[in-house]
Image (spheres, grey):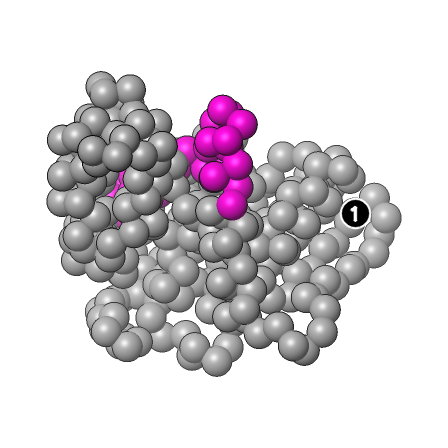
Amino acid sequence: MDWQPDAVLVLTTEKDRYEAACAVLEHHPRRLFFEKPLSARNGQENVSEQDFFDGQKILQLAREQGCETAMVFNYRFFDQSLAARRIAAERGFGQALNISGLVHYACWSHAIDLVHYFAGPIARINALQGKRVHEAGDMRAQDVCVAFLTEGDASGTLIGTAALEWKFPLFDLTFNFEHGRVRLQDLDGEMTVLDSRRADVETYRVTGGERSRWDQYNSSFQKSISAYLQSIRSGGPPPVPGIAGLLELQVEAAIKRSIEQSRPVTLAEDFPLNI
């Protein structure tokens, strides 16, 4: 920190991120760039309410110091995610009305962020949890089923699970807009676009067999970090601000509380951001 770096990239595991961020903040950095999720002491498949409050404290300390924060959230930089945003804007698909998703926990925080990216912040949640524990590598977690409404009144459902086979798509998200529908699958996998005005269906795939899903995955990190570094060079805001990380944890905390208390949770009331 004596070198006075332009930015500090906090790329620890999610279990150690809170302690690492607090240690760096003792030295008043100019900027912090975080891997996702912002904090998860028990792993990304078992985010707790405390993780939200830890993430909130990180951003509050950063704000008090005038430190700019940013998130990686590299799924926004998949070729298909970028194309979906461009197509929806160019063709005037309008507001998101409905969202549905089946998501492996390895992609869970990204899926929540993609909902925010395409449909705006989630405002209200009602969630259920299954009893069976599924395992995937070092992950051990129960399934969750989440019904939600966004601040823009879009309705949606997400299923989170560790039971999806790694060789098959790890997530499947569908966004239904006023004048079209977009379906995104896997790590920059196949994308389907339904355009109601053109009355046709289009399928987009990454060209050529030489690039695997993991090549696309790795490339998305490169694009995310390059975009962040360019924002520093140009003096502009980060492409994915730190608040995006706290919004994701706010959703996770609301899911946990809804399950534990068997009730709907309004995020702004139960978990105000205070940033």
Relative side of 240 to 91, left or right: left
Q: Nearer the viewer, residue 253 or 226?
A: 226
Where on the picture, by quarter, is residue 274? Answer: top left
Question: Which quadrant would the N terminus be assigned to in this image?
Answer: top left
Q: Position of residue 270 (x, y in %)?
A: 23, 31
Q: Position of residue 46 (x, y in %)?
A: 22, 58
Question: In the figure, 224 relative to 5: above or below?
Answer: below
Disc 1 is placed on an element classified as loop
| Residue under the point 29% across and 20% down | 66
Residue that sits furthest to the right in the current view: 198
Q: Nearer the viewer, residue 67 or 167?
A: 67
Q: Position of residue 231 (x, y in %)?
A: 50, 32
Q: Is residue 198 visible?
A: yes
Residue 236 lies in the magenta-colored region = yes
Q: Is residue 157 visible?
A: no
Q: Position of residue 133 (x, y in %)?
A: 23, 73
Question: In the figure, 111 relative to 28: above or below?
Answer: below
Q: Which residues are magenta?
A: 226-255
Q: Main secondary structure of the magenta part?
A: helix
| Residue under the point 63% across and 48% down | 82
| Residue under the point 34% across and 27% down | 68
Relative side of 155 to 22, left or right: right
Where on the picture, by quarter, is residue 135? Answer: bottom left
Residue holding disc 1: 196
Question: Which quadrant would the C terminus be assigned to in this image?
Answer: top left
Residue 9 lies in the magenta-colored region = no
Q: Amino acid at mark 1?
A: Ser
All told, the count of numbered labels is 1
| Residue under the point 34% across and 50% down | 36
Where on the picture, by quarter, is residue 192? Answer: bottom right
Residue that sits furthest to the front in the current view: 3
